[in-house]
Structure formats: structure tokens, C-alpha cells
Image: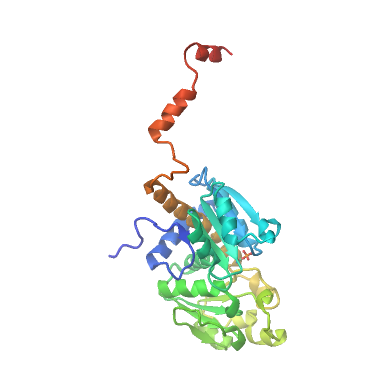
Amino acid sequence: MAKRTPAQWTRKHLLGLEDLSVGEIRHLLDTAEKFLPYATARKAAPQKLKGRTVLNLFCEDSTRTRTSFTLAAERLGARVIQFHAATSSLSKNETLLDTARNIEAMGLDAIVIRHPERGAPEAVADAVRCAVLNAGDDAHEHPTQALLDFLALRHKFGRLDDLTVGIVGDIRHSRVARSNLYGLAKLGSRAIFVGPPLFLDGLDDLTVPVETSTDLDAVLPECDAVMMLRVQFERHEGVALDLEDYKRGYQLTAKRLARAKKGAIVLHPGPINRGLEITDEVADGPESVILHQVTCGVAVRMAALSLCIGALERERKSAKPSPLTPPLSHKGRGRDKRAARPKGRAAKRGRKR
Ligand code: CP
């Protein structure tokens, strides 16, 4: 039988699911599964990141992703620095790359970045030496969100192949839809993008084929899971959306959900526009796994941080020492400690004190 997971994770960056192999996706999910008992802090997690420093470089608002990356890193023993774009020197025209390089110069092991420009995490990854994890860039990728969605799906169905997931709503502006599409295609499942024509526009950037539909009621009977997306009003420059019309065609109501396959579940990455893309009844109903997704997010981010920082540490060990900051050899460090320790009469005096 083919080996399911690679023996060792080799990537120090997690920038998207488009470039990951199915083995790497499974390895991330299997590692996250092991971290799940620690995700709610009921059990103390192994201190795998003790002594490490993680920067949360968020240039866009966030509740779930920032908080869960913070908790994931802290529960593994890392120190987390919160960067707030609005009160930083970005407001004095410092570039993003200068910002990242300057903070890295203070000693960093990982940068978690959310940015409104597509490709910003990749640009930062090219500019620094530490690990870089994409926490969402424009409408491009949100890899840890898709991974936590997969973990929640696997908990319900026990598998990640042969599933049909209807991804419904503001696809055009959604990095979640794109990361889910790339991941589900690799895992052997089917994503169907559903929404009004103006939200199915602008998908030319996709590098895999995608099924689309404007008819949610027709797609629902094929769905094992329905992932509702937030209408992203803040990205709607020039988009004219009739909200009542939208609700009539695409709001997930209990009546509509009854059309989906028996046992179908409801996902939403959050934040939710309650009463717009989804009713309260469905968001809080028995088919909803929305809060379970959030718990899975902590475990996925524990896995992503520990794997990427682990790969960075292996890279650092095999790298030649930098002439600017020569690390002490193991032997040398021992000598330094001995030199600092008082000897003879001075040591005796020290002991008496
Ligand atoms: N799902 C998600 O990315 O939520 P936040 O914007 O609150 O981080």
C-alpha cells in the first residue's frame, strides 16, 4: 500500500493549498488531529515551541484567525507578538517588506500574515529567513481555514474523498472558496461554487477546473456539506447587490437545507451576516458545525506552526553560520559557562554568602 504521509515535513512556509501535495495536506490534518485534545486548553499541550517567537502581522481585521494562531502558538509555549497595522510605522510609509525584515532582526521564528494584497505572504517569505504562514491574502488563499474545514468534514464523514461540498455565496471575493477548491480537488472530493452571476465572475485566476451553478436549490440534493460564505461588503466597490433578491435565491434556510443529502452539515468560515446568507435557525441548528470549525482551527494552527518551525529549525541546523552573528559551538558555550562560574576562593566566598 502507498505510504499515506511524507516521513518529514520539509516546508518552512505555508502559503496556500494550491502548491501542497495530497500527502502534505493529510500530514497537516493528521498532525492537527493529534493536537485537538489541547485545542480547548483542557489538557496542557507539549511545549514544542518553547523559546520560539511568532509575529502576528495582521494588516486586515480578524477575530478567529488572529485569536486561534495566538492561542495555538502560546499553548505550544511560544511567545506571540501582536502587530497592529494602524499604529505601526506602515502609517509613515514604511513598506511591508521593511516592516517584516526589521521585526525579524529582533529575533523571530515565524510570521503569520494577513494582508489585503494578493501575494503579500509570498513576497514576505522571499524577504525573510523565518517561517511564514498565510492567514489570508485578498481573494487568493486562506490555507489554514480550508484545513480546519477539512478536519471538521473528516470528523463528520470519516473521510475526505468522494464528498460534494456546495460553496455558496460571494465566491468572487473569497479566499476560503479558492483554498477549499484546491484542497478538495486534491483529496478526491468535489466543490461546486454556487451564487448569482456577479459572484461567479472573476474566477480566471483559478488553476483547476471548477463547477459553478447559479441555482442553489438544484445543487443542494447533491451536497454532503454546504459551506455558506459571508457577503463581503467591504470588497464590493462597484458591485450592485439587491439584498432581498439575494436572500430569495441563496439564503440558507431550514426549508432549503432539507433539500440537501440526509446527514448534510453546514459550515461557515465566519464572520456571519446573520439573516443574510444564513438564518439564525440554520446557523445555530443541529446541522451546523460552525463552532466546531473554530475549535479545529486552533489544532490546525498548532500543527501548521509546529511543522513549519520544525522545518525552519532543521534548515538552521544545516546552514552555515552567519558571519554577523556567529553562534557559539556547543563546546564553546560550555567553556563560556565555565568561565563565568566563580572558582577557588571566590567560589567559596560565594557559597558562604
Ligand atoms: N474565518 C476567518 O478568517 O475569520 P476572521 O476574519 O475572524 O479571522
For the N terminus, give its image quadrant: bottom left
Residue found at x 67% / y 79%: 236
Q: 139 or 195, which lies in front?
A: 139
Q: Is residue 205 rendered to the left or right of residue 62?
A: left
Q: Is residue 40 among what the camera can see?
A: no
Q: 264 or 176, which lies in front?
A: 176
Q: 20 or 158, which lies in front?
A: 20
Q: Position of residue 116 (x, y in %)?
A: 61, 69
- How is this picture coloured? rainbow
Q: Is residue 4 among what the camera can see?
A: yes
Q: Give the residue at the far left of this rendering.
A: 1
Q: Residue 175, located in which quarter of the rendered image?
A: bottom right
Q: Is residue 46 above or below residue 213?
A: above
Residue found at x 60% / y 83%: 199
Q: Position of residue 14 (x, y in %)?
A: 48, 62
Q: 290 or 28, which lies in front?
A: 28
Q: Position of residue 231 (x, y in %)?
A: 65, 77
Q: Is residue 12 above or below residue 185?
A: above
Q: Is residue 229 rendered to the left or right of residue 157?
A: right
Name the quadrant where ligand 1 sits.
bottom right
Q: Position of residue 95 (x, y in %)?
A: 61, 61
Q: Is residue 231 above or below residue 316?
A: below
For the C terminus, give its image quadrant: top right
